[in-house]
Image: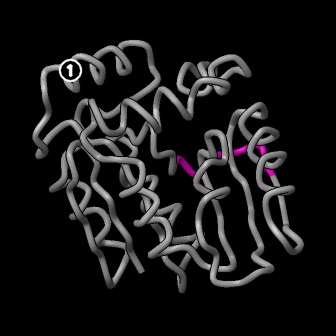
Amino acid sequence: MAGQAVYTPRTLDVYDVVVLGLSNTLIWKCPTQRLLDHYNDNVSDRHLDVGVGTGWFLDHCRFPSDQPQITLLDLNPVCLEGAAARILPARDGPFCLHWPKLSAGLSSGCPGAEGSGLRSSQAASCSRRGCVRLNPFVAQGVGRSGSARALMGFYNAKGIFSNQQDSVDDLRRELATWFDEVRVEIIGCAALFAAR
């Protein structure tokens, strides 16, 4: 899958600077610090991280316990190994680290509207009593600058994103079918949601 293959050791070496440092703020108009605040508001001591990237959020978030149980889930073994290596020395206390060879599709980088129902149903099965949180970039229902439209178009053409049909309204509607409590906040191109 192109969306996973792009994450090589070389691209992950620059990911934090390019994506978290520049793209989030300058192109998607959703600063990484705001994403981290959203993460901190919803993280628990039993945490499943899907689409782990470099593990930056796990490395910087504040878990409510000093002994969280963390499960890593990603199609890309490079991401999994890198994230695991990053968070183990950075935290006190034991971790439960797994990387099953499947994906629930809850990646913040490539949401894919055509899969929004799949993502929500999988999230529901993973977290019936917990909180599911995500920061997907959506194409419809948000204000996008010319650079955001161009970069999103490029990522979709390369198969890195698959969100051309993603809309805020569809996201809210789909989440409401699976969860009792749904909060969606739009910041730039990102639809930050938390659902219980």
Magenta residue check for 153: no
Q: In the drawing, does residue 58 fall left or right of residue 156?
A: right
Please tell me whether residue 174 is drawn above or below residue 195 in the rendered image.
above
Q: Residue at point 33% right, 14% down?
A: 154
Quarter where residue 26 is shown: top left
Q: Residue at point 48% right, 26% down?
A: 18
Q: Position of residue 15 (x, y in %)?
A: 57, 29
Q: In the drawing, does residue 192 fall left or right of residue 173?
A: right
Q: Position of residue 50 (x, y in %)?
A: 60, 52
Q: Tell me, what colour scheme is on the image?
A: one colour
Quarter where residue 171 is shown: bottom left
Q: Nearer the viewer, residue 17 or 130?
A: 17
- Main secondary structure of the magenta stretch: loop
Amino acid at circle 1: Ser
Quadrant (top left/top right/bottom left/bottom right) for the N terminus:
top right
Quadrant (top left/top right/bottom left/bottom right) for the C terminus:
bottom left
How many marks the image carries: the answer is: 1
Quarter where residue 21 is shown: top left
Circle 1: element type: helix
Please tell me whether residue 98 is drawn above or below residue 54 in the rendered image.
below
Magenta residue check for 102: yes
Please tell me whether residue 154 is drawn above or below residue 161 in the rendered image.
above
Give the labeled residue for mark 1. Answer: 147
Q: Residue at point 78% right, 34% down?
A: 77
Q: Residue at point 27% right, 73% down?
A: 183
Q: Position of residue 147 (x, y in %)?
A: 20, 20
Q: Nearer the viewer, residue 23 or 134?
A: 23
Q: Position of residue 158 (x, y in %)?
A: 43, 13
Q: In the drawing, does residue 152 fall left or right of residue 60?
A: left
Q: Which residues are magenta?
A: 99-105
Please tell me whether residue 129 is drawn above or below residue 136 in the rendered image.
below
Q: Nearer the viewer, residue 64 or 139?
A: 64
